[in-house]
Image (cartoon, grey):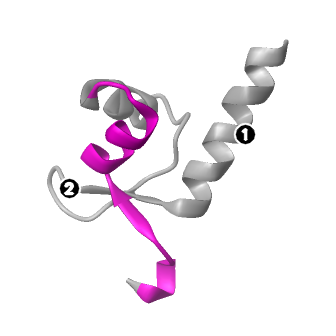
Amino acid sequence: MELLGKVYTVEETAELLKVDINTVYKWIKEKKLSAIKLGGTTWRIKERDLHYFILQAAEEGRK
């Protein structure tokens, strides 16, 4: 997956952000967090999308 750069599983993303896996799925469903669906239930989150999500969340927190 070098073409995509570093990618994370939903589980890895949840661990990094210290949230429940279901929260990550919720953010994906709500289109708050961009993710790539690789099959029936397999999702991957690109590192740059995760960084963007964190920056957006930080901005929201400042409002």
What SS does tag 1 mark?
helix
Q: Which residues are magenta?
A: 2-20
Of all residues shown, which one is farthest toward the top?
Answer: 63
Q: Seen in the image, is 49 located left or right of residue 37?
A: right
Q: Which mark is residue 22?
A: none
Q: Is residue 1 above or below residue 16?
A: below
Q: Seen in the image, is 58 located left or right of residue 29?
A: right
Q: Is residue 26 above or below residue 47?
A: above
Q: Nearer the viewer, residue 37 or 23?
A: 23
Q: Which residue is mark 2?
A: 42
Q: Nearer the viewer, residue 45 or 62?
A: 62
Q: Earlier in the sequence, mark 1 or mark 2?
A: 2
Q: Which residue is mark 1?
A: 55
Q: Nearer the viewer, residue 43 or 6?
A: 6
Across the whole image, how many numbered discs are drawn on residues? 2
What SS does tag 2 mark?
loop
Of all residues shown, which one is farthest toward the bottom?
Answer: 2
Q: Nearer the viewer, residue 32 or 16?
A: 16
Q: Amino acid at mark 1?
A: Leu
Q: Is residue 59 above or below residue 45?
A: above
Q: Seen in the image, is 28 located left or right of residue 47?
A: left
Query: What residue sits 61% from the left and 61% below the top?
Result: 48
CA neighbours of label 1 inside 10 A, class few (<14), some (14 to 19), many (20+): few
Q: Quadrant of the N terminus?
A: bottom left
Give percent across and percent down for residue 49: 58, 55
Q: Amino acid at mark 2?
A: Thr
